[in-house]
């Protein structure tokens, strides 16, 4: 296995009395696509949000690309440039064009000139198949296109790792394929990815490893074929059989 680019150890997260993560360990190798599945409330999204400190873990350690994310001396905004995140909601600025949304962080966070930011932004939009939509505002784009702009915004910063939190769940079914296609291209280009999603077909075909979480712990993990066809744990079996009925 290649060297781990993400190493999380003993992650706990409490929201008041609610214990959402109960000592989660996670290693992600460079260029690996790790898929996290599990029932609602199992802690999947909280785990992702802890990995870039949108949530502060209650205990544990996180190293990303050699940076200790929980060290108080770490410049979190600088560190976050290495960790792209794509959410369920697209979080685009409605008054800005697609290109404007993509280049904002390049200028404000990465300190690029407008010309340089525009060149990188156009390239990122090309990568997600939206080179011809650079001048469109979010309101002129479909949900799938908006999500692809959000992906372009992340990859423009050249992150070392991409986190996807239910990236297709807000989309109409016919728009899901275009977003999964972009994710597949990213994977093929060598991007390290951690994906929380209900797209089990995509997990089967594209993931290197699948983690099954339930009640704040990683119950089991392995290659997709093992998890989907021959899970070793009762809880995993129950979850897989339930999703396969839908």
Image (cartoon, helix red, strand yellow):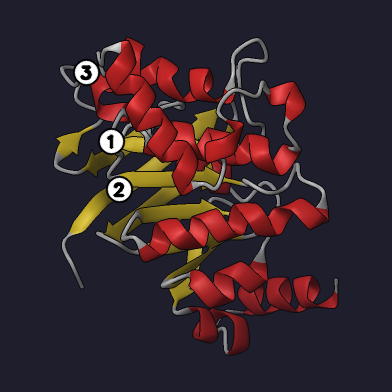
Q: Residue at x 18, y 67 (%)?
A: 2
Q: Which of the two labelled residues, at mark 2 and mark 3, occupies the earlier sequence position?
A: 2
Label 1 SS: loop
Residue with the mark numbered 2: 8
Q: Position of residue 159 (x, y in %)?
A: 31, 39
Residue marked by disc 1: 82
Q: Is residue 234 left or right of residue 99?
A: right
Where is residue 192 drawn, in percent x and y? 34, 55
Q: Which dot marks residue 176?
A: none
**Residue on which disc 3 sits:** 75
| Nearer to us: label 2 or label 3 | 3
State the residue in front, 103 or 176: 103
User: How far apart in space, not on screen, are marks 2 and 3 (Cα)?
Assistant: 18 Å
**SS for tag 2?**
strand
Q: Residues within 10 Å of mark 2 (few under 14, many from 20)?
A: many
Residue 156 falls in image quadrant: top left
Please state if 68 lies on the left or on the right of 203 as rendered.
left
| Quadrant containing the N terminus in the rendered view | bottom left
């Amino acid at each position: 296995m290649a060297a781990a680019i993400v190493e999380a150890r003993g992650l706990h997260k409490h929201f008041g009395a609610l214990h959402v993560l109960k000592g989660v360990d996670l290693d992600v190798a460079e260029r690996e696509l790790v898929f996290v599945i599990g029932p609602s409330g199992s802690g999947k999204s909280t785990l992702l949000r802890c990995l870039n400190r949108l949530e502060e873990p209650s205990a544990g350690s996180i190293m990303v690309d050699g940076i200790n994310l929980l060290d108080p001396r770490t410049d979190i905004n600088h560190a976050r440039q290495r960790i792209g995140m794509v959410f369920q909601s697209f979080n685009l600025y409605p008054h800005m064009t697609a290109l404007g949304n993509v280049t904002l962080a390049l200028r404000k966070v990465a300190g690029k000139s407008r010309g340089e930011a525009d060149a990188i932004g156009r390239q990122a939009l090309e990568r997600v198949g939206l080179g011809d939509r650079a001048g469109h505002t979010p309101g002129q784009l479909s949900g799938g296109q908006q999500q692809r702009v959000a992906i372009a915004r992340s990859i423009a910063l050249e992150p070392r790792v991409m986190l996807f939190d239910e990236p297709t769940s807000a989309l109409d079914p016919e728009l899901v394929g275009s977003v999964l296609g972009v994710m597949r291209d990213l994977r093929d280009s060598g991007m390290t990815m951690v994906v929380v999603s209900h797209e089990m077909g995509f997990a089967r075909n594209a993931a290197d490893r699948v983690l099954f979480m339930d009640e704040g712990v990683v119950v089991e993990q392995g290659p997709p074929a093992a998890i989907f066809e021959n899970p070793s744990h009762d809880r995993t079996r129950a979850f897989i059989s339930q999703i396969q009925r839908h």
